[in-house]
Image: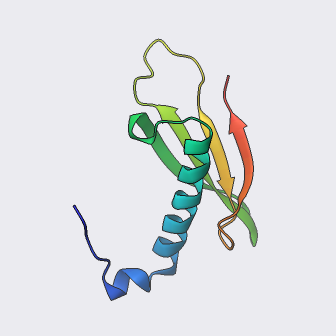
Amino acid sequence: MTTSLTADVLQDELAVSVARVLAAANRKAEESGIDLVQSLISISQRGVDQDWVWRVNYSPKNYIGRRGGDLIIDVDPNSAAVTQVLRGQ
C-alpha cells in the first residue's frame, strides 16, 4: 500500500522529525539484528530544553516468559544521527 503524504503533513515539523528519527533508528536496529515486524516500537523524548533526543525502544511482541532483549536507540532530532545504542540483557 503506497500513500503519498499531503502538503500539510510535510509542513508539520514534528511529524517530519519523528519520521526521520524512526527511519534512522530502524536502519540501526536492522543492522543490530532486530526483526522490525516482530517488535513493539515505542518513541519518547529524553532530555531537557535544547539538549534532548528521541529514544526509540524495540522490544519483542511475544514477551511472555522472556527477560530483556530490548534495543534502545537514541537519535538526535536535528541531524537524525544515532547518538547511543543500548541493548537489554
User: Which image quarter holds the C terminus?
Assistant: top right
Q: Answer left or right for 8 relative to 3.
A: right
Q: Residue at x 49, y 47 (%)?
A: 42
Direction top: furthest residue = 65
Q: Residue 50: give x, y in percent of width and height.
A: 75, 73
The residue drawn where x is 59% and y is 59% is 24
What is the x, y in percent for residue 44? 57, 53
* Vertical relation: 66 (above or below) 31: above
Question: Which quadrant is the N terminus positioned in?
Answer: bottom left
The residue positioned 65% from the left and 68% from the top of the image is: 77
Does 70 appear above or below 6?
A: above
Q: Which sits in the foreground, 10 or 26? A: 26
Count up the numbered dots: 0
On the rendered structure, is 26 left or right of 32? left
Q: Tell whether 68 sits left or right of 4.
A: right
In this picture, residue 14 sits left or right of residue 75: left
Residue 37 placed where, x, y %? 39, 40
Q: Quadrant of residue 62?
A: top left
Residue 72 found in image quarter: top right
In x, y percent, where is residue 18?
52, 66
Q: How is the image coloured?
A: rainbow
- In this view, the residue farthest toward the left is 1
Q: Where 26 sits versus 11, above or below?
A: above
